[in-house]
Image (tube, rainbow, N blue to C red):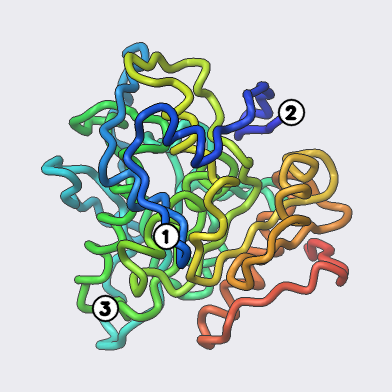
Amino acid sequence: MQRMGMQGKGTMWPRALSVGALMLMGVSVTISAAAAPTLASLRSHYETSVTIEPMLQMPLPTPPTKLFNTVRYDSDGMSLAAFVTPDPQDQKKHPAIVWITGGESNTLADFWRKGSRQNDQTASPYRDAGVIMMFPTLRGGNDNAGNIEVNYGEVDDVIAAAEYLATLQYVDSSRIYLGGHSTGGTLALLVSEVASSSHPELFKAVISFGATQETMFLQEATFTGDEQREIELRTPANWINDIRMPTWIIEGKRSGNYYDLKPMCDKNKNPMLHCAFIARHDHFSVLYPLNRYLAQQIMVDEPLSIDSTKSWTIKK
């Protein structure tokens, strides 16, 4: 089964383990008739053993100050960089979104430079509509402390970034959203699954474009502990029943990760998880029209909804 990342890279992964298999491997799992263990509870008792080859760290980018301010937020005792829309100075509380980019999501480059409407990975429709935006770097990225953990500690970083965003006087802390694309969309799904238990009021909704059922690029990681356990705890498909906040999976039907996501969505019985597969769009062209539509809903404080049967033609 092929998965596509930001650069269209494909890979193959073994199927993830069941909770029963985790128990056989010695993971402490408490099961009652009422509820199975959540991803949040399992993560709280497990420290990852992942290591990856050191990467050349990129300096922090310097976006125009009229678009983004550079800030630092704290996560697990580390000071991490992020970029936030400046205060509009209108004495109002505004909706906001934390956006996780695709590719190597820990690091940011020129994230503010808009792409074409066929491939705008900057989520620019939100800032154009007036939504406050936050682009966090994550552990091990750019000049940050820590090491890249491939969708493990990064879950905590995203939650910490949103908590920082909620403290800004011009942000409506009851209207903070989370979004991401490709590998960033996969991370957004994991955050939804964890935060639903640990921080149930933090995000009003989660938007995941072009995610995959399993975390990609683990072939570049080394685990000194139990590799199968590590994969299990990074596999969004295994934890969709944990989701307790409105969460949207969106992908174009033309290539991308549609064929990876569809079986998971077909089996989904969680009313909080919604899937929208858009005809005549691919992994990238789906971004602009859907983000523009969702930004409009966010600005008028409507529940997010998508009619995947309508025409989502990109207007010039």
Q: Residue drawn at (33%, 18%), measured in percent from left and top? A: 225
Q: Is residue 302 above or below residue 40?
A: below
Q: Would residue 63 be visible to someone looking at this image?
A: no
Position of residue 278 measured from the top left corner of the image (x, y, whole percent): 81, 58
Can you tell which quarter of the image residue 260 is in? top right
Residue 2 — which label?
2
Q: State the residue position of label 1.
A: 32
Q: Residue drawn at (48%, 24%), measured in percent from left and top? A: 228
Foreground disc of the pair 1, 2:
1
Q: Is label 1 in a helix, a strand or a loop?
A: loop
Q: Residues within 10 Å of mark 2 (few under 14, many from 20)?
A: some
- Name the kind of residue labelled 2 in the image: Gln
Q: Would residue 257 be visible to someone looking at this image?
A: yes
Position of residue 177 measured from the top left corner of the image (x, y, whole percent): 44, 68
Q: Is label 2 in a helix, a strand or a loop?
A: loop
* CB-based contact (under 8 Å), mark 3 and mark 2: no
Q: Earlier in the sequence, mark 3 or mark 2?
A: 2
Q: State the residue position of label 3.
A: 170
Q: Foreground: 89 or 12?
A: 12
Q: Residue drawn at (63%, 72%), measured in percent from left and top? A: 271
Residue 292 — which label?
none
- Name the kind of residue labelled 1 in the image: Ser
Foreground disc of the pair 3, 1:
1
Position of residue 91 measured from the top left corner of the image (x, y, whole percent): 25, 88
Q: Earlier in the sequence, mark 3 or mark 1?
A: 1
CA distance separating discs 3 and 2: 42 Å
Answer left or right for 13 relative to 42: right
CA distance separating discs 3 and 1: 43 Å
Q: Foreground: 24 or 274?
A: 24
- Name the kind of residue labelled 3 in the image: Tyr
